Image: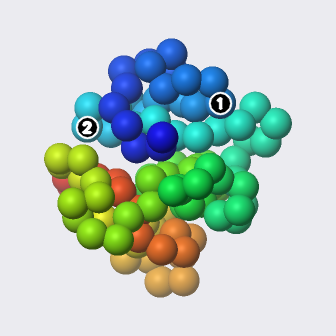
Amino acid sequence: MDGRRGTEGADCGDDYTCDTQAPGGYCLYSPRTVSSCTEDAQCPPGTLCSPKPWHAISGVCMRRCQLPADCREGYVCQIVELFAGEENGPKSSAPACWYVREM
């Protein structure tokens, strides 16, 4: 499942990558047939297509959430934006588990 801990790609499984910059690592679905998702339907159940904050990647599959308790410790349940506060910038269609980057 996307959003689980990982320290390298092998921890996450086939068709997943591990974002080691996220606290405790974060498994992201990235099928080998496409470089990124463009819509939620391309993502596994329980996930959605979202921009990856602060990166040039147009879309990755992240864990969908409704409540903070749906996310693991250190993560928040919120709409994910490519660049926080950017008006009309790319953002997820619904809340996803992600962390708040310290500036």
Residue 51, given in percent of the width and then of the height, sits at: 55, 59
Query: Disc 2 marks which amino acid?
Result: Pro
**Which of labels 1 and 2 is toward the front?**
1
Q: Is residue 33 left or right of residue 19?
A: right
In the rendered image, the quadrant that contains the C terminus is bottom left
Question: Tag 2 or tag 1, which sits nearer the N-term?
Answer: 1
Rendered view: 55 above or below 89: above
Residue 76 visible from this viewpoint: no
Measuring 69% from the left and 48% from the top, which residue is drawn there? 36
6 or 54, which lies in front?
Answer: 6
Q: Quadrant of residue 69?
A: bottom left
Mark 2 secondary-structure assignment? loop
Residue under label 2, please give it: 23
36 or 94, which lies in front?
Answer: 94
Crowding near pointer 1: few (<14 within 10 Å), some, many (20+)? Answer: some
Circles 1 and 2: CB atoms closer than 8 Å: no
Colour mapping used in the image: rainbow
Residue under label 1, please give it: 15
Mark 1 secondary-structure assignment? loop
Query: Disc 1 marks which amino acid?
Result: Asp
Total tally of numbered discs in the picture: 2
Residue 60, given in percent of the width and then of the height, sits at: 58, 50
Q: Is residue 34 left or right of residue 13?
A: right
